[in-house]
Amino acid sequence: MTVILVDPRRPSLVPVEAVELLGGDVQYTEELPIKVPWSLPSGRPVFTGDDAAVLLSSDRQHPEVQARLAAGERLIAAPEPQAGERLVDAVAIMDKLRTAGPWESEQTHDSLRRYLLEETYELFDAVHRGDLNELRDELGDVLLQVLFHARIAEEASQHAFTIDDVADALVRKLGNRVPAVLAGESISLEDQLAQWEQRKAAERSGDERRISCVDDVPTAQPALALAQKVIARVLTAGLPPELIPASVVSVTVAAERDAENELRTHVLEFMDTVRAVESAIAANRRDTDTPSELDVVAPLGAVTAEEWRRHWPAPAAEALELPLVPEVVTDDDLLDDVDTVRVDEELDLPELTDDVEPAEPDDEADQPNSVEPQ
């Protein structure tokens, strides 16, 4: 008497040693898909007639399975699930949701962007809090975003890909980046990091090569993270640290200022400056027979600190903001604005004669004002 347990995800796959036993009298449990008993020459449902010599099932907890195993019958079982097998179930659920879900079927890569960002921040918070149960749940939410985007990509009219293509790209990347570790070789941390960067640079070819050291830096990330990434890139490219503007390496936070927006603006302007200087360096290196168009399509290669300094634009003079104070005017200042006349010069003034009578006083001006206090 024998119990054969198959994998519920792949019930048609049976262990090799069980194949010859399925040609005789076999009973099967009810959860198996119909295609399985149809492939059995002498299969019949469990609990019909006498017990068959073989019981086929995919449910270890089934009462009949438990009873026969308790009686000491032989067990032939499929290998235990390996790590990651439940991912197959997650992929299948995502496929079902995309096909039958009213909301899921309408989503696009763009409409899911805010959810991806939100779930990433929630995962970050879970890591910070150190709650492993919360961390597990938030990792699942991020995984859902990965599965969702991959499922949408299957429907693309051009360059479509599947979740298997995503996994394959990751496996190939890791295999190329850390071959020594995966081969079981002993390697130091410094050598592993150096190997990673070398092989990462070698992977870039053709149109995917970076022309500028700040190319392919995602500018939609938070401004502080963007600044850190750009600073790391330019320093790796040999830019002298003193050429990095203070507005990029320091942040002023105040209630009346938008520090996030200000920093992002400064970093983007700095990136534009870096690209312009790289183009100037490329033009300076170019010989007269090389078209100038190649300055912006060919990798620049290593740049020395002297090249960076020579082509870096001079900082613009900053206007001083002085406080506004009342201007004090002196007698001397007033005299400077008046045309002076030499004492010995004759002035052509009208003569006053005796016929000129003094002006009559203004009666209204001399009258007391009824409003003003007397």
Image (tube, rainbow, N blue to C red):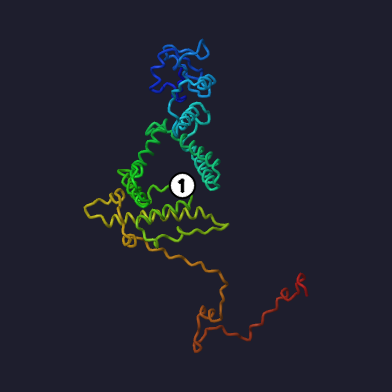
In the drawing, does residue 374 fall left or right of residue 60? Answer: right
Image position, residue 317 (x, y; %): 43, 65
> Which quadrant of the view contains residue 85?
top left
Decide which of 315, 3 is in the foreground and name it. 3
In the drawing, does residue 63 fall left or right of residue 191? Answer: right
Packing grade of label 1 (10 A; few <14, some 14-19, many >=20) is: few
Question: Residue at image x 50%, y 26%?
Answer: 100
Against 342, residue 118 (above or below) is above
Q: Quadrant of the C terminus?
A: bottom right
Q: Residue furthest left?
A: 289
Label 1: which secondary element: loop
Q: Residue furthest top?
A: 49
Q: Residue furthest bottom?
A: 344
Image position, residue 35 (x, y; %): 44, 17
Decide which of 327, 232 is in the foreground and name it. 232
Decide which of 138, 188 is in the foreground and name it. 188
In the drawing, does residue 157 fall left or right of residue 263? Answer: left
Image position, residue 61 (x, y; %): 53, 24
Give the labeled residue for mark 1. Answer: 220
Question: Residue at image x 52%, y 55%?
Answer: 259
Give the residue type that dot 1 points to.
Ala
Question: Residue at image x 45%, y 65%?
Answer: 318
Against 346, residue 361 (above or below) is above
Decide which of 65, 199 is in the foreground and name it. 65
Q: Residue furthest front?
A: 72
Image position, residue 217 (x, y; %): 41, 48
